[in-house]
Amino acid sequence: MFAVLGELKGGAMKVGQALSVFEAGMPDRYAEPFREALTKLQAEAPPLPEEEVEKVLDTQLGLRWRERFAEFDGEAAAAASIGQVHRAVWSDGREVAVKVQYPGADEALRSDLRQLRRLAPLLRPLNPGTDVKGVIDELYDSAVSELDYRHEADTQRVFAAAFTDDPKIRVPSVLASSPKVLVTEWADGRALSKVAADADQEERDRAAELLAEFQFSSPTRVGMMHGDPHPGNFLLDDDGRMVVLDFGAAIALPDGFPPILTSMMRLALQNRGDELVTLMTRAGYVGRSGLEPADALAFLGPFIEPMREPSFHFDRAWMQGILAVYGDFSGREFRTSRSFTLPREYALIHRVLSGSVGMLCQLEATAPYRQIVQNWMPEIFADED
C-alpha cells in the first residue's frame, strides 16, 4: 500500500489526506509506517518555481496583480492538497495566504484518483468493516468538485460570516478568488496531527471539544457541513481557538442535519432496535437479506456510544476494537455487513462523521460529546428514559 502511495503524482497530497481517516483504526503494526508514508508525501511535495507562480497569478488575477499586495513572498510557505500556499501582505496591511493551484493539477488529480481505486483491496484487510470502495468513489466525486477555487471561496465566505467573532471557532475571511487562486486571511496555529503528537492532555481535550463543537453546530449555524475531515484542515491557535481551513468540499444542509439520521440516532440511543430496523429499511440502509435489531444498533455504535455518558474518552484502542468487530469475517459480523447498503444522499455525511471520530481517536482525548450533540441536536435525546 505504501508503495502505491509513492507512485501517485499531482494529487498525492489529496489522496494522503483522504486516507488519513483510516489511520486511527489501523493495527499498530500498520499505523506507524502509514503515518511515515503520509509525512514523506508532504515533505517531498515539489514546490512550483517562482516564475511559474507568477504566470498563474498573471492569468488568474490579471497582469497588475502585484498592485493588490503590499508584499508577496515568491517562495512557497506550505503545500496544499493540489497546490501551494504563499505568504503575502494585502494592500490594506493584512497578512494573507495565497493558494495557487499547480498547473495541470486537475488532470493529475483525476488520474491519481483513478489509480487510488487500486488501493481498495489493500486497505480492506486493514479496515475490513469499511466500504473502502464506496469511500474512494465518493472521494473522486467530491475531490473533483474542489478544483474550482471560486466554489471554495463562496463556501468559506458563508462559514466565515456564521462564525464571525466566535470565541471558539475561527474561519479566515476570503479577500479574492479565481478558478486557480484563492486569497484568504493568514492563519497561524498547530495542525491537529501536531497536537496529537506532542500536546499535553488538556490541550488535546480542548482540541477535541472544539472539533466536535464545529462539526455538530455547522448544520444549524451555517446550513452546511465541512466535508474534508483530516487533521491538516484544523489548527489550534495560541488563543485556544480552532481555526478551520479548506472549504472545497462541503455538504449542503439548508434544513439542518437530515431528520432521518437524527431519528436513527435517537432510536439507537434508546436501544429501540426493532423500530430502528424499520426506519433504516425505509431509508434504504438495508439490503435484501434483512437486518437484525442488534446489528442495526451496532451499526451506529461509533456515533452513539460516546453519547451515553457525560464525557467520553476517544482512543485508538476503542476505534480498533470497533473495527475488529466489524471486520470479523469468520461469522455473524461478516454476514451482517452484507446486509447494509449506504444511500448516496447520506454517504458524505457518514464519511465526515466517521472521519471526525477518527480524528478524536488520534487525539486520544476526552470530550463532553453528549452535551455538544444535545446542544445542537436536542431531538436525538427526545423522550429519553
Image (spheres, rainbow, N blue to C red):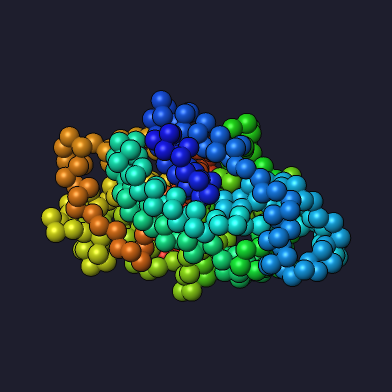
Q: Residue furthest top?
A: 29
Name which quarter of the figure residue 151 lies in.
bottom right
Residue 144, percent from left and from top: 47, 61
Quadrant of the frame with the N terminus: top left
Compared across the picture, whether 205 is left or right of 268 comes to right
| Residue depicted at x 42% and y 41% | 22
Quadrant of the frame with the C terminus: bottom left
| Residue depicted at x 67% and y 42% | 190
Reply above or below: 36 against 310.
above
Reply above or below: 363 against 138.
above
Relative depth, front residue between 276 and 346: 346
Q: Residue furthest left?
A: 289
> Visible in this render: residue 213?
no
Residue 217, percent from left and from top: 54, 61
Residue 20, percent from left and from top: 48, 42
Compared across the picture, whether 114 is left or right of 299 comes to right
Relative depth, front residue between 68 and 315: 68
Relative depth, front residue between 347 and 96: 96
| Residue depicted at x 86% and y 60% | 70
